[in-house]
Amino acid sequence: MSPANFRELNDAQLAKLDDEKIIEYIRRARAAKRDDAVEVAARVLAFKHQVAVQGYVGSRMRRFGSITYDEVTEVALQDAIVAAVNFRGETLPEFGGLVYRIAGLRIADYHRKKRLDTTPLVFLSADGEVVWRDIPAPDSTDAVIASAIYKPVFRSCYEALNDRHKRVVVLRRFDDLSHKEVAAEINRQLPEGATDLMTDQNVAKIDSRFDECLQKGLDEAEGEPDHDG
Amino acid sequence: MADVKQLLREYIQRQEAGGDPDAAPFLERASEGDRAMLETLIDGYWMTRPPKRWDAEAAQGSLAARVASRVAETLATEQEEPAAAWATLRHRAKLSREQVVERLASALGVAGKEQKVHAYYHELENGWLDSERVSPSVFESLSQILGASADWLRGLGGPAPRAASPGISPSSVMARKAKPDPELAEGMASPPAGRPVPAEDEWDEVDELFRGG
């Protein structure tokens, strides 16, 4: 689409788009030199992820105070949006994964420097890998820094699941439902007449396989240095 | 030692009651063997949170609004012409060109040679310097002063002077020619001023930093 054909959307319309489409919209707005439209779309995207990223960052650096972890959250979200918009490779990494990878690097950098560096520090390689500009990768031999670096274990196990199985994991792990309750909840969302009902046994199997995947990932991560960054 | 499931449940309950997100006290209560699993599950709890529903009123003045403003500024700056981009960076850092030069000279250890640094900095802002020949320490110092990455600042300079042939800055061309080439002079926004063109025996550390390669 040429910049002249840029069609502006309002915040409510943007809120209905998925992350990838919002990023594409920001690219078009930027090409049309519509900074105001870029800002509205970036606000919608950041707002979607704000609470979760704040929680993730806060879980790892709350002890430094809420102002600090809010600042780290801000910079991480900013980095992630700019990196995604500037990405020129073929497959844009999923925005959720990207923002946590960058947040992990920002947290590690904070621990390393004992201050927040607001310099834009990351970009994406053509393969969608996060590249940490200018400074050496965080020292993964330092225990505090190593614990701050993003670990992809959960995300890689979770992203390998289909949507239904993802829902099972969330209900079972984080909403603390029993196998039976999870199965009922999943089946409740099926269209009438559906035959592929979830059973308690199915839930137990998905749950146990997910556990195995996490444990395997953690065992492997323990045996190798961190490469992220 | 409390088990992982119990600790995760307590952590989530605290979140849902509006508590703070610090995971450290919970991780400390886990056995060493369970700590990594608990940490991973706490990560997962945040990563799988449903996206926050759009609320225009709540978004006003929020963290997301601050992020958006900086994103728009960054993306706009990135597509500006170099001279405009440098000016935006200075404006954002609330520094005049003179203040940038003063700090740059100090950071590079060439205090007292501000006039020469100023002339080179002027060339850099106008895209007249071959940034490949500028020392990394110049961009690293500017990165700290202006709050932009050194790589990106180097990219702003471009691989070669815009108004001249590759690898040659207008001032260095003039140094070799008794009379400036009118074709070359055409299209220059303004010639770099204030820095005497160094003869070979006058080449100093400032020249080395900006043109040493």
Image (spheres, coloured by chain):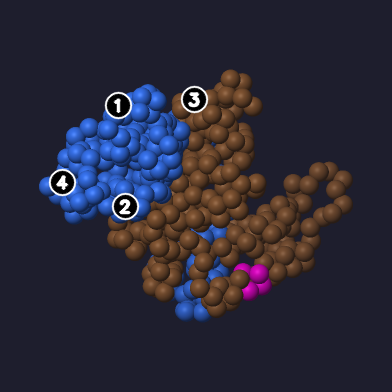
Per the rendered image, the range of residues in magenta is A212-216
Which residue was labeled with disc 4?
Answer: B113
Q: Which chain is blue?
A: B
Q: Residues within 10 Å of mark 3 (few under 14, many from 20)?
A: some
**Chain in brown?**
A
User: Could you tell me which residue is drawn at 39 percent across and 37 percent down?
Assistant: B161
Q: Can you see residue B61?
A: no
Tell me the amino acid under the disc marked 3.
Answer: Arg
- Main secondary structure found in the magenta portion: helix
Residue of label 1: B190
What kind of residue is marked 1?
Ser
Instruction: Give B52 or A36, whichever is nearer the viewer.
Output: A36
Mark 2 crowd level (few <14, some 14–19, many ≥20, 10 Å Cα): some
In this rendering, would B121 be left or right of A133?
A: left
Across and down, in percent, residue B165 comes to: 43, 37
The three-letter code of the residue at mark 4 reads Lys
Quickly name the residue at label 3.
Answer: A34
For label 4, the SS is loop
